[in-house]
Amino acid sequence: MIEDKNQQRTALEKLGEFGLIDHLTKNFEINQKSTIKSIGDDAAVLDFKSKQLVVTTDLLVEHVHFDLSYVPLKHLGYKAVMVNLSDVYAMNASATQITISIAVSNRFPLEALEELYAGIETAAKIYDIDVIGGDTTSSTTGLIISITAIGEIDAKDVIYRSGAKPNDLVVVSGDIGAAYMGLQVLEREKEVFKVNPKNQPDLDHYAYIIERQLKPEARRDIIELLKKLEVKPTSMIDISDGLSSEIMHICKQSEVGVAIYENKIPLDPQVISACEEFNIDSTTIALNGGEDYELLMTISQEDFPKIKGNPNITVIGYITEKARGMNLITRDEQSVPIIAKGWNSLENQE
C-alpha cells in the first residue's frame, strides 16, 4: 500500500506529464485490428468498417467510490476497467478499446501509479482490449479515475433497455448481493483496525464476497454463452446500482411492468451467512446492494428451453403490462411494489 514508508517513492514531477504517460503505458499491447493508432498522437484512430460503435464512460472518485485504506491499487485499476466493460457487454457488444484519465495528488508516488496501471494492464490482457489514450493531471482531493470504453457490434445485434415485452422472462446472470456484503466486511474491519492497529483480520470466511467487491468480473462470458445458445435478449442492463434500480430502468424505458419472485433471486451461501451475521435481510441486499456487475435481461418465453437448467443464468420473474406495476412477489406470495433504493453517488458518501 502507498502508506508503506519502506517502499521506494519516485516523485511524479521528476517525470513530467508526458514522461509519466510514456512510463505508465509502455507495456500496453495492441490486440484489436480496429486499432489503427493508439497512444502517441493527438487522438486515437479506429476503423470499425461496417460495425456500429458503442461508447461508455465511468468516473471513480476517492472517498466516494473507493477507500484506499482497504482497496489495493492494483485491484482498483482492474475494477475501474470492469465497471466500463460491463456497460459495453450490456449492449451485447464486444469491448475493443479504452482510454484512461487520472487526476492524482502529490501524496501518490510513481510506484503507486505503477500498481494502479498494473491492474489496468492485467484487465486489458484478459479481456483483449487496447489502451489507446487518456490524460493525466493533478488533484487536490485525492485520486480520480475516468475510463472510457469503446466497443463494436453489428447493427442487428444491439440490445437496448427498451425492448422488453409483456410475458418475457426476467433473467439474471450469476448471483447478486455479494459485492455489497464484501464492502460491509471491509468497512467493519477498517473500524476495528482504527481501534487496534495491531489487529490482523481473518478474512478467509469472506473470501468470495470480498473478491466480488475488490475484483469483480465483467460478464463477457455470458454474452458469448447467449450467442452459443442462439438467444438474443429483448432488453439488457448491467447490475451496477442494484437489482431494483436496474429492473425499473428496463420497465420505464420499455413501458412495461414486472413481477420478480423473491425465492428465485440467486444468492451465494456466503452472502446469506454474512447477512445473518450483520443482521441484514438478504433480499434487501440483493435488491439494493449494487456493484455486482452481473447482467439483467429479458428473453422471449420461446427461448426458455435453450436456457433451462443452465447454471450461469437464473429466471427470476416475468414482464407484465405496465398497468400492473413493478412488484416483488415475496416468499409468502404477497405482492410488494419495487422501490429503487440502490446506490446514488450524489447522496451516498463514504
Image (tube, helix red, strand yellow):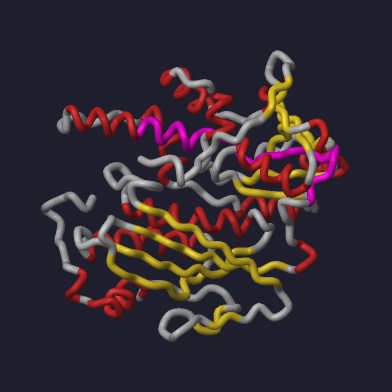
Image check: 34 left or right of 66?
right
Question: Magenta segment, which residues?
Answer: 163-186
Asked if residue 170 lies in the magenta stretch, the reply is yes
Q: Residue at x 17, y 68 (%)?
A: 11
Picture coordinates of residue 333, whole percent (x, y):
74, 16
Q: Residue at x 33, y 59 (%)?
A: 116
Image check: 121 left or right of 82?
left
| Closer to the camera in the image, 288 or 2 | 288
Q: Residue 264 falls in which quadrant of the image? A: top right
Picture coordinates of residue 158, whole percent (x, y):
74, 61
Q: Is residue 97 above or below residue 220?
A: below
* Res 229 seen here: no
The residue most toward the right is 302
Picture coordinates of residue 56, whole percent (x, y):
57, 62
| Closer to the camera in the image, 230 or 157 | 157
Image check: 203 left or right of 36?
left
| Closer to the camera in the image, 280 or 214 | 280
Q: Residue at x 46, y 59 (%)?
A: 123
Q: Residue at x 29, y 31 (%)?
A: 189
Q: Is residue 319 above or below residue 155?
A: above
Q: Is residue 229 above or below residue 132?
A: above
Asked if residue 178 lies in the magenta stretch, the reply is yes
* Res 37 seen here: yes
Q: Residue 250 falls in which quadrant of the image? A: top right
